[in-house]
Each structure stands twice: as C-alpha cells, then as structure tokens.
Image (spheres, helix red, strand yellow):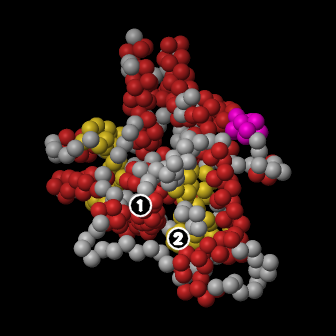
Amino acid sequence: MYNILVVDDEPLICKGLAGLLNASGLGIGKIITAGSGEEALDCIRMEEIDLLITDIQMGEMSGIELMHQAKIVKPWMQTIIISAHETFQYAQMAIRLGARDYLIKPLNGEQFLDSVRSVLLKMDKPLPRTEEVLSGGHEDFRMEEPQPGFSEPLNRLLDVTVDHPDEPYPMQSFYDSIGIAGPYFAVIKVKLAFSGADGESAFPEKDIPLMQYASLNIIKELLDQELNAQVFYAPDRSINILVQWSEEEYAEQHSNRINQLEMISRSMHHHIGKYLKIECTVGISQILKGLQFVNVLSRQADKAMLWTREHGDYHIFYYGDFSWHNYARDPNAEELSTQSNRIVEQAKAYIEDNYNKKGLTIHEVAKRNHVSPNYLSYLFKKITGFNLWEYVVKLRMEESKSLLLHTDLRRYEIAERVGYESPEHFSKIFKKYFGVSPSDLKK
C-alpha cells in the first residue's frame, strides 16, 4: 500500500485528485493533501510518502523547489508534476530532478490515473537492467563483465600521482576516447558488504560476480539521468565512479553539486539494499578542477569511508563533513564525539534563534554548520534522540501554545509569529502535535 501526497494551492483541485485516487482501486494506503510547498514539505518530513503529486506554481515555494527539498529528505520518493503551463523549461527542470511525468491542466482523469498507476507499478520492480540480470533476462541476454581494458586504466587514473601535471597522462588517448574531459571531477566509491559482521561470506562465492554486476547496473541506471560519470569495478570488488562536469554544466545556477552527489549516493544505497539485500557504504569526495587531482579525490573518498568505524549505522560519507584540517592525524573516538556534539549544539542554537522564520529548511541549518543536511540530521537524531525537524516543530508548538493560552492573538497572528505561511497549515500541525485544534485548546 502506497502513501500519496497531493499538493496544489487550489483546494478544489486537491479534493478532486484525492477523490479520483480514492475511487481508483489502486493499492493506496493514505492520501494526504497540502495547499502549499511549505505544508507539503512538513508532510514529507513527518510522514512516509511514496509518491508526490504537485502543482508547479504555488505561492512562495514552487513545485520545482519542493521537489528539490523533498529529494534531500527522501531521494527515492517518486514525483508527478502537474502544471497549467506547457513550458519546455519547466518540464526540463522537472525531468532533470527525476519527475516521472509532467501533466498539463486541465487534467484528464483517466490520463492522470494511468500516470499514477504506471509509477506505482514500477515502485516494487528492480530497475530494468537489474531485473534482467536477476531473472536471467531474455533468451539472448548474456551477462557481460566490464573488460579489464576498461576498468584498469580508470583505476590507474585514481591511483597515479602526477608530478608534472602539464605533461600528457599515461593512457591519455584512452581517456580522450571515452570522453573524460572534465575539467571538474569528483569520485564516489561504493563498498559492497559481501561478508557479514562475523566475517563469513553472505553469498556463495559463485554468486558474488553476479551481485557485483547487478549493483553496477543499479548504479548506472540511477546515474544515466543524473550525472556524466564512468562506472567501473574497483580491484577489491567494490565499485568506483568518476563524475565529471564541463565548465558550462558546473556553472549552471541553482545547482548544489555536493547535494546532488549525496542524493544519488543515498539512492544507490537504498536501491542496492532493497533489490539485492546487500549492505553498502558510500564515500564521496569533494569536487576539484583538473584531471591531475583525481588521485586526491580518490583518497578523499577512501578517507571519508573510514568514519564508518565510528558511525556504524550511517552509510553515506562525504569527505567535507569532517574537519580534517583540525587534526594532524585521524581523530580518536573522544575527538570525534567532541566534534559531533559541537555540530549539534551549534545547530540547536541556530534553530532556537530562527525557528519562527518562514521557509526555514534543514539545508539552511546545515549550511551554517558547514556540513551536509543528511549528516547533520543523522548526528542530531543520534545525539538528541529525535530528528531535527521534530525539534523545530516542538519549539514552534510550545511557543504557539503559550501564545494561545496567555495572549489574545488570533490564529493567523500566532501562525505568523511561529513561522507558518498560513493559519490552515499551522492548525494541521498543531492538531497533529497536541491532538486538539488551536480553537479547542483555547476554549
């Protein structure tokens, strides 16, 4: 059963689409509606949402911005965009962010349900190439291992230290032939856990090449629509990814490249675990300009993954989340704990000063702490026991309750004071938190 969130600033459209979905006979568990991007984002943070259906033009937060923020929280959540404008630029941005369909208003009910049905049917299926691998594929399908002639030069590129960067690289003609030009690069490494915690192999030896190949196909499938990257086997049965951007691609506005790398890495981890039942750890480097720094990026991805020794329940590690420059050597457990506590305390202080700010996001809090949103969310939950957005809501609700009981402020005035863009949104969150509406509590 799937949970669906319908978002539109026209209440009649929300009601109509929810009615169509309820009467569709599809495997739908819960249908939630929201009248703005901010309200929808609260739902995504606090509920298990499988499919987001959103209008593209809604007040302060557009459907595109909602998609971007939602991807940070749940990168595997599927999205259908609805719009009154058949604008190529909007459609292009939506598809780039992973939208499964782009429907034009006025909506045809049958076409709308066909789109939803198509998305839901694909949710429980492995990605196409992976499904072929796991099922044995069609009659003419044969598993083809990436040839050593492809992987070895790329692994050499990750390992070689260049003393004279102006001189041609060894194998330069090979790199040119497969389109490695950059000039901006990042390295992602996916370490597959073929052994359990006891060191025993979780798979028969004969199945490991198949699982490695299936993992590689999942990664390729996810990257095809997102990034220009080379995916190849590492010598230790893991998978290496060399990502590149041209000058034009890197200069595109409104693109946070590290967020993009982290979101795709979270999707890799999610899909490999879901379809193959293989645990994996992902290390992400920074982004540097110049082919001569690829070996530096490779070491960064390796070093980032070392932190799994301290964070065994975390799986996506970005090199820039750790203050390496503060230590002459790798920090010990006590130093790591001190650093983690400092990040969380700084985040709490910022939230306490800004919880009543409209449009506050986890991304903004993370940026102030110079860490990625997901790492901050992980640390916050680990150290405080509740997630970061729950803390924002807690502060907002405690303040709003005090204002309700001790002032004569109206509901819309209280909503404004505690950071909600509408009294309706405020009332929904208030009733979910306290179990009664603001007016009932006032009585």
| Helix, strand or loop: magenta stretch | helix
Question: Could you say where residue 141 lies in the image, as x and y percent from the top left?
Answer: 30, 74
Which element type, helix, strand or loop, lies under badge 1? Answer: helix
Coordinates of residue 282 in the picture (x, y in percent): 56, 55
Q: Is residue 20 left or right of residue 324?
A: left
Q: Nearer the viewer, residue 361 or 263?
A: 263
Disc 1 target residue: 207
* Element on which disc 2 rests: strand
Work out whether mark 1 precedes mark 2 in sequence or the reverse, and give the earlier one: 1
Vertical relation: 400 (above or below) 443: below
Q: Amino acid at mark 1?
A: Asp
Q: Mark 2 sits on what residue?
A: 232
x, y percent for residue 271: 42, 54
Q: Is residue 217 magenta?
A: no
Which quadrant of the structure image shows residue 360? top right
**Residue closest to the far right:** 328
Left or right of 409, for residue 236: right
Q: Is residue 234 visible?
A: yes
Query: Residue drawn at (33%, 43%), measured in percent from left and top?
Result: 5
Q: Nearer the viewer, residue 317 or 438?
A: 317
Instruction: Identify the amino acid type marked 2.
Output: Phe
